[in-house]
Amino acid sequence: MRTPRLIAIATLAVFATACSQQGPGESGAPAAAAGSARTIGLAISTQNNPFFVELKDGAQKAAADAGLQLVVVDAQDDPARQISGVEDLIQKKVSAILLNPTDSSALTGAVQSANRAHVPVITLDRVVNGAQVASHIASDNVAGGAMAAQFLARRLNGKGNVIELVGVPGTSAARDRGNGFNDEAEKLGLKIVAQQPANFDRAQGLSVTENLLQAHPNANAIFAQNDEMALGALRALSGSKHGPVVVVSFDGTPDAIEAVKQGQLEATVAQQPAEIGRLGIETARKLLDGQGVQKSTAVPLKLVAKDSAL
Amino acid sequence: MTEAFLRTPKSSLSLQRSLSVLQRMGPAIGLLLLFVVLSILSPDFLIAGNLLTVLRQVSINALIAFGMTFVILTGGIDLSVGALLALAGAVTADTMAAGHGMGLAIAAGLGTGLLLGLVNGALVSWGRVAPFIATLGMMTLVRGLTLSYTQGRPIGVENPGFALLGDGYVAHLVPIPVIWMFALFAISGFLLRGTVLGRHVVAIGGNEEAARLSGVRVPSIKLAVYGLSGLLSAFAGIVLTSRLYSAQATAGVGYELDAIAAVVLGGTSLSGGRGWLFGTLIGALLIGFLNNGLNLVGVSSFYQQVVKGAVILIAVLLDRRK
């Protein structure tokens, strides 16, 4: 009875000491990537949103111009799938990874794996908490949120009852746009009557807006944290008997700019997703060539309203 | 082949027997073919590091699919697994965030999954609700619970011991989730092959009325099977939470379909009574290696879904033909 128990304990002890968070081949020298020295990986959060498709297109065009090969993996908004995608890129021995995280907290481990494999990571549009990245490229979302609040305050002479459609909770884009908007709205005397997540999604923007219009007959403005939700909200408005509602959103996708031209959407705070993608490739190229890069780059925003959209 | 293919007695004619040999080899042959093709197409594929990475990627789906195999063998289905995974992860992370130890947190997460799985079982057996509807209702309910519990925000985990569960390695080589996968494969395989419970599960799926008349306590077995599915989903949720350093309110959306696909690819009949756990493991590996291989080869992510859908359809069609 005693010996088997000893063996069991010994095995357990060996097992326990052998456990670590360091995986195979992650401690060695920089990966010698002979065949694929000029391949860049892009791990994109979703392609079910025109914003990220534009970002990807911008990166693809820039990569082609710079003579770099670009491999795209799509997470379909699932962080676990994105981790797998990043691991696959590491296995493929890409020289750098452009990461557009699905979520700011879940990708920490994946970035650490890349660091251990000596593959530099550049985050696009959203940050990754608690991990070391070579560079971060994004719009100044806080400033953009404030721009939207200023526009609404001007347009409604400071007397607004605003419904806020919130993006995917936990993403830095949703948090920063929300904070920028909410702080500025409070300063300017706008009242936020409701705040609900519609997860950056057009269909959810439609249904959430329908419900909120029902619940808040006095609402006269909607701030959507992205265009897709706003376009959903516009559908809800066109089918309702609710009084006039001013809709302002964020991103400046082609659909939204078109809606601004037609006078349905009052304004959108336009980001330049293609520019984010282009700068990502540009930064990766500099890294490969051994040049220094900026720790973070803010891509400028601009408010597109009807008179300025033409 | 370490495990015999489980069949209902009525299909044991000799012709059917030889056909079923072919049938059970199908998924394994498919996996082998996939290996050969991917090794030719990508120089990075057939490397120990990559294969271990894929095993780790597969482990979450495999854990869920093991439980799903039992449910499908009884002729049922469990659509609530992805939602249970998310809730169990959130409960575990939140228990630790409240300052409790890792052991209690894991017990709380597993308990949540087991309890709600048992509720599924009770609805199906005593409530006489169709499994599809019972677990669909549970899925929606649990998704809502998870969202209100987390307020839609991820719950971070900072416990370094807990991080090992999903993100650690044994001897710097084998990812720990892979150990879980093979350990639970062995345990589930024993349950299915070596115990009365397993034989009763297959008997119910073959002919529930006949099983009942020959003394199988159908309601208790169903209760156990849905409970097991809930428990395994909760465990998968805990491993995933560890890998993600956080519990995500929206984790596991669509995982029920991946698990069902693994079970069906492995050759288990959706109408119950016929199937095996080894096939499910192969099915999960097929899906995982396909995902990984398509990324390595650099197939556009739009076409990846087309390829995966086509593979599932072809595999099931071939399974029918034999």
Image (cartoon, rainbow, N blue to C red):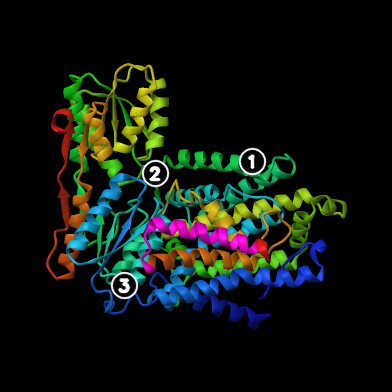
Neighbor class of circle 1 (other Cα within 10 Å; few <14, some 14-19, many 20+) is: some
The mark closer to the camera, 3 or 2, is 3
Residue A168 visible in the shown view: yes
> Which residue is label 1 attached to?
B133
Question: Residue B198: x and y, percent?
Answer: 74, 62
Name the chain under label 1.
B
Helix, strand, or loop for circle 3? loop
For image coordinates 64% across by 63% down, the residue present is: B319
For image coordinates 16% across by 35% down, the residue present is: A303
> Which residue is label 3 attached to?
A93
B313 in magenta? yes
Q: Are marks 2 and 1 on the same chain?
A: yes
Question: Residue B43: x and y, percent?
Answer: 38, 77
Name the amino acid, label 3. Answer: Lys
First along the sequence among labels 2 and 1: 1
- In the current view of this chain or complex, which residue is farthest to the bottom? A3
Q: Is residue A207 above or below residue A129?
A: above
Name the amino acid, label 1. Answer: Ile
Name the chain under label 3.
A
Neighbor class of circle 3 (other Cα within 10 Å; few <14, some 14-19, many 20+) is: many
Number of the label disc, if any, that sits on residue B153: 2
Name the chain under label 2.
B
The mark closer to the camera, 2 or 1, is 1
Structural distance between the alpha carbons of marks 1 and 3 = 46 Å
- Quarter of the image that includes the N terminus of chain A: bottom right
- In the current view of this chain or complex, which residue is farthest to the left? A291
Q: Is residue B15 above or below residue B84?
A: below
